[in-house]
Amino acid sequence: MTTVAQFTIDYVQFLDHQSKVVQPLPSFAQDLSQLKDMYRSMMLTRILDTKAVNLQRMGKMGTYPSSLGQEAYAIGMGYALQPHDIFCPYYRDQGCMLKRGVKASEILAFWGGDENASHYTHPAIHEDFPIAIPVASQTLHAAGIAYALKIRKQKRAVLTTVGEGGTSKGDFYEAMNFAGAQHLPVVFVINNNQWAISVPRSLQSGAKTLAQKAIAGGFPGIQVDGNDIIAVRYVIEQALATAREGGGPTLVEAVTYRLCDHTTADDAKRYGNKAELEQAWQYEPVARLRNYLQQQNAWNDQDEKQLQQTCTAEIDQAIQEYLQLSPQPLTTIFDYMYAKPPKSLATQREEFAQTNQLK
Ligand SMILES: Cc1ncc(C[n+]2csc(CCOP(=O)(O)OP(=O)(O)O)c2C)c(N)n1
């Protein structure tokens, strides 16, 4: 018997759980002003999440999926992307979207039920996709867009994201297969936050890592400490550069932990593991970077207070903008799926409008 193929999955981390540097930092991370900028983005996202959940609790917004504990994963991606790349997000990527230039008020408006909010006002990202709610569907969109970029010979890359639960879906495997077979400029990032609503990672897959799912697609998979923003940005920057240069796809598994409920429609206390959650708080990404900055004498309590104030003011302003928007007519739930709706849907719309005395 001979071995016909062998594979390895690497794990990348720069700052360990105690914020200690475990290998030489990449050049961007030697620049403390860049790290402070990244810290600011994480703080902004955390405050947006807290206030968005409160808005839902007050009945002023629809369902909202917090990204608490997953800020490094999202913002690391945001810093790795270039404006001309294309982002196909899933519903827990508000940190990356903010960094891309989506307004916080647009994110709130989307979760408030306004589809127009996905028509981002920032001119550089008008090709970014709307948030995908159907699990893993965005991975197929990303492969399709990457195929178009390849045909057009454009030096751009597509980045798409999926939860670890989404990697059990056929859509994900089909997207990976197509991307590998066609050598497409796409990077798939898994937010392995250990839970798919109430299903734990241990029941999701028998595979030791989720990164190894890339192997069957014929391209590299790599695992990264998803709570170490330096590692996330570094690995994804490299994967995107490879994609833009014609080197094909990469799958990145970012290992995080969902410190919040799945969404505002969930109560994780009913199924979660309290001890595991308490432990996960010890490794969370915002404190990880703050501790490092403090160790470098680049951050103090006064900086922290000031940052919290400016981020709070920015999000409060976005909330005001959101609350001033006029609610969309209920009939809009029929309006954006088809350019020309099929007859059955048109009839339903008509009935719905008549029953509710709407236009
Ligand atoms: C096709 C489809 N099936 C079911 C759902 C309902 N649903 C929403 S989120 C979710 C779990 C997804 O978990 P995971 O992929 O791990 O991502 P996470 O929410 O943990 O970030 C499910 C089953 C859906 N949105 N789409």
Image (cartoon, rainbow, N blue to C red):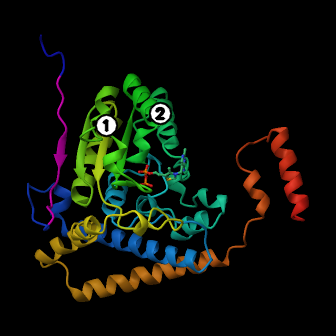
Residue 37 located within the stretch drawn in magenta: no
Label 2, label 1: how many angstroms apart (C-alpha)? 18 Å
The structure residue drawn at horizontal position 20% and vertical position 80%, both measured from the top left corner, is 299
Whether residue 240 is visible to the viewer of this picture, yes or no, is yes
* Mark 1 closeness class: few <14, some 14–19, many ≥20 residues within 10 Å: many
**Taken as a whole, is the magenta stretch helix, strand or loop?**
loop
Whether residue 159 is visible to the viewer of this picture, yes or no, is no
For marks 2 and 1 on the same chain, the one whose residue lies earlier in the sequence = 2
Q: Residue 234: image x %, image y %? A: 23, 51
Residue span colored magenta: 6-17
Q: Name the quadrant containing residue 1.
A: top left
Residue 14 located within the stretch drawn in magenta: yes
* Mark 2 closeness class: few <14, some 14–19, many ≥20 residues within 10 Å: few
The disc at residue 250 is 1
Q: Secondary structure at mark 1?
A: strand
The structure residue drawn at horizontal position 51% and vertical position 33%, both measured from the top left corner, is 144
Task: Tell whether label 1 touches label 2 (CB within 8 Å).
Answer: no
Q: Name the quadrant containing residue 50.
A: bottom left
Q: Residue 212: image x %, image y %? A: 27, 35
Q: Secondary structure at mark 2?
A: helix
Q: Residue 82: image x %, image y %? A: 38, 50
Can you identify the residue that label 2 sits on? 170
The disc at residue 21 is none
